[in-house]
Image: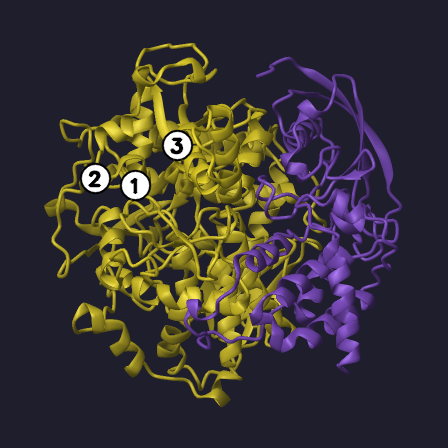
Chain colours: A yellow, B purple
Amino acid sequence: MSQQLDSKIPQGPLAEKWTGYRSTVPLVNPANKRNMEIIVVGTGLAGASAAATLAELGYQVKAFCFQDSPRRAHSIAAQGGINAAKNYQNDGDSVYRLFYDTIKGGDYRAREANVYRLAQVSTNIIDQCVAQGVPFAREYGGTLSNRSFGGTQVQRTFYAAGQTGQQLLLGAYSALERQVGLGNVKMYARHEMLEVVTIEGKARGIIARNLVTGKLERYFGHAVLLCTGGYGNVFYLSTNAMGSNVTAAWKAHRRGAYFGNPCFTQIHPTCIPVSGHYQSKLTLMSESLRNDGRIWVPKKKDDNRHPNDIPEDERDYYLERRYPAFGNLVPRDIASRAAKERCDAGYGVGPSKMAVYLDFRSNLMNKYGRAEASRLNIENPDEATLVRLGKEVVKEKYGNLFDMYKQITDEDPYEVPMRIYPAVHYTMGGLWVDYELMTTVPGLYALGEANFSDHGANRLGASALMQGLADGYFVIPYTIGSYLSKDIHTKSISTDHEAFVKAEQEAQDRLNQFLSINGKRTVESYHRELGLIMWDKCGMARNEAGLKQAIEQIRALREDFYKNVRVPGSQFEFNPELDKAGRVADFLELGELMCIDALQRNESCGGHFREEYQTEEGEALRDDNGYRYVSAWEYKHGNNWELHKEALEYENIKIAQRSYK
Amino acid sequence: MANHEMKINLKVWRQKNASDAGRFEEYAVKANPDMSFLEMFDVLNEQLIEDGKDPVAFDHDCREGICGMCSMFINGRPHGPKQGITTCQLHMRSFKDGDTVVVEPWKAQSFPVIKDLSVDRGAFDRIIAAGGFVSVNTGNAVDANSILIPKDVADEAFAAATCIGCGACVAACKNSSAMLFVSAKVSQMALLPQGQAEREKRVVAMVDQMDNEGFGSCTNTGACSAECPKEISLSNIARMNREYLRAKLVGN
C-alpha cells in the first residue's frame, strides 16, 4: 500500500498561511517541555540554531556532530551572504519579490507555501543575528550593507566580507554553547549517527558511534531532527568539506523516510578548476564575485595568448551576450551550463582548457578606481593609479577570496583573471518533508540542506544560509509543538528497549562487515571512481543512455566494494578510514537512486539538464504537464525504490518559461 | 603550473592513543608542487593502507582554511612555514624536492592527543560556553538597523571574530597560553553595543574557564599572533587585559 503524501499546507491565502498556522498550532506548556528530549544531529546553521532555540524554550536537547567541535560544521565555509527581504536599499524588494525570485530561480519545482514562509521569516533572521553580535558589513552611517546575488535585480544580500557563513555559524554556535553552559543542551562532538531507532513507527532515538572510542552508543529522544547537510560528496570532488556525508539521511531513508528529488544537484559556476588526479576537493569562489567580475573566453579557439594580451574586441563575454538583462548575474545553473557549452565547443582556457576567465580588471579600474580617484580629487588618473586605488576597494570586499585563490593557484587575481569552472556545490534534493519539516517517519524531522523543500530544481545564491537559519530559529520551534503536544504522556523510553538493541546490532554488523572484507582497494579509490561516474553521467548534463549505463556501473562498483575494500585497523579506536567506509558505502547506494531519479524525470529543469529536452537556444525545457511534481522515493528492500509524487500547485505565481534575457 | 615530481622525507609523530608514549616514524612520499600538504598525506595514507600498515590520523574537514579543524605542527611551526594560512592551504610548492619535513600534533597539556596528529580541543568550546555569547533568546531581537554601528567599529569587531578556533596560538606559545583565542571573542563582544550588557561578566567567566582548563599565562612574546592563520592582532590581548581589570574594578 503506498502511503499518500500529505504536505500539510495550511488553508488560507498564501500571505496568511504561516501567521494563521502559528496562531493555532498546539503548544506544549513549559512544565511539559522540561520532560521532553529532542535529538539534533548536525550542528551547522540549521542544527545549531534549532538546538539552541529548542533549549531556550525549555526542551532537553542532545546535539551531535562528527567534527571535533560544533563550530566546524560546513556552513562555516559559506562565503557570499544571506538574503533577506528587508528592502533596506529602498530598491523595491518585498517578501513577495523574494518569494517570487526563489520560485522562479528554482525553475518552478519548489513548494509555494514553504518558500513564502521562508521569505517572511528572512527578515527576523537578520535581526536575530545582529542581536547576537554577528559583525555584518556596514556603511559609514552605521547601517547594514547589502550586495547583489544571482537571479535577482535587487540588493538584498547581507554579508560579512567573504566569510558570511563563518560569522552566522559562530553566532548560532555561541547560542548553542550558551545552552550547553546552562545545562540545557548536552553536546556530543566526534559522534556519528549510524541508525535511527523507531518504536511503533515513530522516531525515538539514534545509534551513534563515538569516533574516539569507537563504541556504539544509544540515545533516546521524543523526536529526532536531522540537520546533516547535503550529499554533494557523492561526486567525490565538490566544494563540500571532506567529512560531509549522506549517512544520517540515508539511514533515515532506509527506515522509511522518503527521499525527495535526489537528482537535483547544484553545480556552482565559479570554482577553481581541477589541477591533478590527487585532488581531494574543489574550492568555491563566491558568487558575490560576479557582482564585480566579468566572465569571458577568447573569441578564437585555442587562443594561447596571455589573457591580459587579448584585446577587448577579441573577448566573448558570453553571459552578457546571451543574457543581457541579468548578464553575469544569471542563476547558477544557467551560468554553469554556459561555461560548459563554451569549453565543450573548444573555447576553454588554461592548461586543461576546461576553464573560463572571471576578470576583475575592468571594474577594478573603471568602477572602483575611478570612484576613488574622483573622491580623492585625482584628475586624469593613469592606469596604474586606477588599479592601485581599485585594488584597495576590492580587497576590502573580497580580500580573503583573492588570497585563497592565489594560495591555491599561485596566480594573483588582482593582476590576472581568475580561471574558473563549475563544480558540485549544493544539493536541492533531500529528505522529503511536509510543511512542518517532518519526514514520512513520525517524529523524524529534516532541516536545512538535508531536506528538499525550498529551492526546487535550482537554489539561488545566498539562500542556503537563509533556509538553514529559518528552519532552525523560526520554523521548527513552532512546528515541533504540533507533534510533541500529542506526546506529552510518553515517558522517556529506556535504551534497553529491544528496538535500540536491534538497531545497534545492525550498525554493529555493518562495522564488522567493513572490517572483515580485508580486500585490496582503499575506500578512497572507490569513492573517486563513484565520483567520476556521477560527474560524467549525472552531472551538468544527463541523457537516458548515460544514466542507464551509470546505474549498471554503480551496481557493479558497489558489489566490488563489498568484496574488495580494505579498511585498516579496528573498531575500538580512532579510525577515520572506518568512518569513511560507512559513508562511501551509503554514497554507493544514493548514487544509484540519483541516476534513477534523473532517468525518470523526462524534462530539463534548473540544475537537472537532460540533453534530450532543450530549447533551440540550448535552454532547459520543462514539461509542466508531465513533471510538475516532487519525486519522493520510498526505499524497498535490497536497493529497490517506489516513486511517489507530490503534485506542485501554483496558485500565486503564473508558471512561465524562465527567462533571464 | 609546475608538474615535476618531488620527493619528500616525512618524519611524522605516531601515537596510538592518549596513553601511548609516541615516537617519530619516517616515510618517503612522492608529491607534486600543486598538491596541498594534506593531499600529500592522502597519498601517504593510501600507500600505507595498500601496504597493510596503519594510516596516519589527522584532523581536517573544509580544506579551504575556514573550519579550523586541521592542526599540524610542521617543522616547528603551527600550520607550517607560510604566514596567514592553515595547513590545508599550504601547498607543496612551499617545499623543495628532497626536503625533510617534521610533522607533529599541537603540543599543549590542555590539548591531549587522541591519535597521531589529532588532538582534543574541547577546552575551547568550554571557554565559549562559559561566556562567549550575547544572552539573547531567539525572538527577542529588534530591527537590525535600529542598532547603528560605525563602520570602523564593525570592521574591528569582524577582524577579531574571524578567529577559526584552530588552536595554533596555543601550539605556538611556549607557555601554551590561550590568550589570543579568548581575547578575540572578548574583543568582538566588547567592541559591539550588543555585548555591553554582559561585558564584565563575560570577560571574567571566560578568563576563569581558560585558567581552569590549564592554559598557561601570557608573557607577551607574540608568537600566537605571528603564527595565527587569520592574523588575529595582539592588540586583542591588551584589550582583554583592560576589560578584565575594568571588570574587577567595577566589582564583577
Position of A477 relative to A615 (above/below): below
Structural crowding at the residue carrying mark 3, measured as other residues with C-alpha within 10 Å and reported as few (<14), some (14–19) or many (≥20)? some
Q: Earlier in the sequence, mark 2 or mark 3?
A: 3
Q: How many labels sit on residues?
A: 3
**Residue A456 placed where, x, y %?**
27, 50
Distance between the Cα atoms at labels 2 and 3? 26 Å
Q: Are marks 3 and 1 on the same chain?
A: yes
Is residue A255 something that shows in the picture? no
Position of A16 relative to A174 (above/below): below
Query: Which quadrant would residue A495 be assigned to in this image?
Result: bottom right
Q: Is residue B213 left or right of residue B46?
A: right
Q: Where does label 1 land, which residue?
A: A331
Say what amino acid the circle numbered 2 marks.
Tyr
Q: In front: mark 3 or mark 1?
A: 3
Q: Are marks 1 and 2 in contact (CB under 8 Å)?
A: yes
Distance between the Cα atoms at labels 1 and 2? 9 Å
Q: Where does label 2 land, which residue?
A: A660
